[in-house]
Image (cartoon, grey):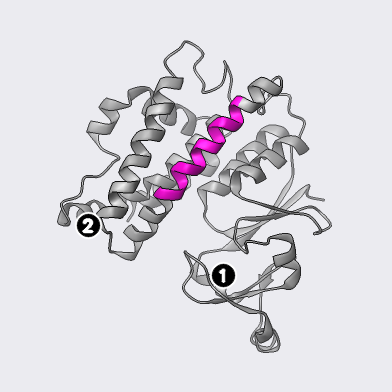
Amino acid sequence: MSALRIFSYLPNPRIAKATITARLCGVTLDVRGASVPELKHWLWDFDAHVMSDAERASLEHLLRTAKKGFTSTLYKTEAFLEAHPFGTVPAAFSPDGKVGIFESNSIMRAVARLGHDDAKLYGDDPYSASRIDSFLDASLLFARDTQIYVLALWSGSIAAEAHRSAEQAFATYMGGIERALQGPAGFLVGERLTLADICFVAEMTLFHNELPHADLLQGLALRPMLSAASRAEFPKAFAHFERLRAMDAIAPDIEPYLQALGKH
């Protein structure tokens, strides 16, 4: 039996935080989901599944107005909303479905706690664990502004203000990562891979959604952030990303997503 069930839109680099951690910690996950457009046909529940036409007709009382990232109404059970009061995905559940865990960083932490963490992905002591938490919290600030930016790019229209906010968030985040890598340790927290590194590679992978939209940015006279200039400004941060994405425990989740972006 799986130790954790996760329901989300797929593919989703933020789910990779949990799946990479699970691979390293020996945790079995049950991951369910589909693309964003297809999730309108799913019942959002612990037992998430594609609904038949008859089931959909009988469950119209569960229709809820979609939130950002979705453009239709969605079928969410009361049990789902009790476990996940913000009504968003990714949504993780305890094996009995009674405990909901939301936000990708929290789901990743849950996997590390559930596993045999011989790799010490969550640190050696309360101090290193708290330093890891600091990086995870900083990533939330980065993700907030850059998610707005990425969604706007895929919609085919990006306001200068959204670009400016994302640019500031990118510079702040990458600047911190660059400084954290100045020492000899080689990783963000200490001398080995931790949740801080896993979160970083996942968030940067998601941000690579900028790449297929170079023509849109050029047409609006907006500078891309994944540029040669950025690589020159943050060389250690970009080198760390390249190193992480090539690792055996990380590549299976990250490389297919990046390769798919390259086909757009």
Viewer can see residue 248: no
The x and y percentages for residue 239 are: 38, 25
Residue 194 figure quarter: top right
The x and y percentages for residue 51 are: 66, 78
Membership of 33 in magenta stretch: no
Point out the stretch of residues depicted in magenta. Answer: 131-145
Marking on residue 39: 1
The x and y percentages for residue 99 are: 78, 55
Relative to residue 228, is residue 7 depicted above or below?
A: below
Mark 2 or mark 1: which comes first in sequence?
1
For the residue marked with disc 1, what is the amino acid?
Answer: Leu
Membership of 135 in magenta stretch: yes
Q: Secondary structure at mark 2?
A: helix
Viewer can see residue 71: yes
Tag 2 residue: 216
For the residue marked with disc 2, what is the amino acid?
Answer: Leu
The x and y percentages for residue 25 are: 71, 33
**In screen coordinates, is 227 left or right of 152?**
left
Residue drawn at point x = 33 percent, y = 40 percent:
168
Residue drawn at point x = 54 percent, y = 47 percent:
14
Main secondary structure found in the magenta portion? helix
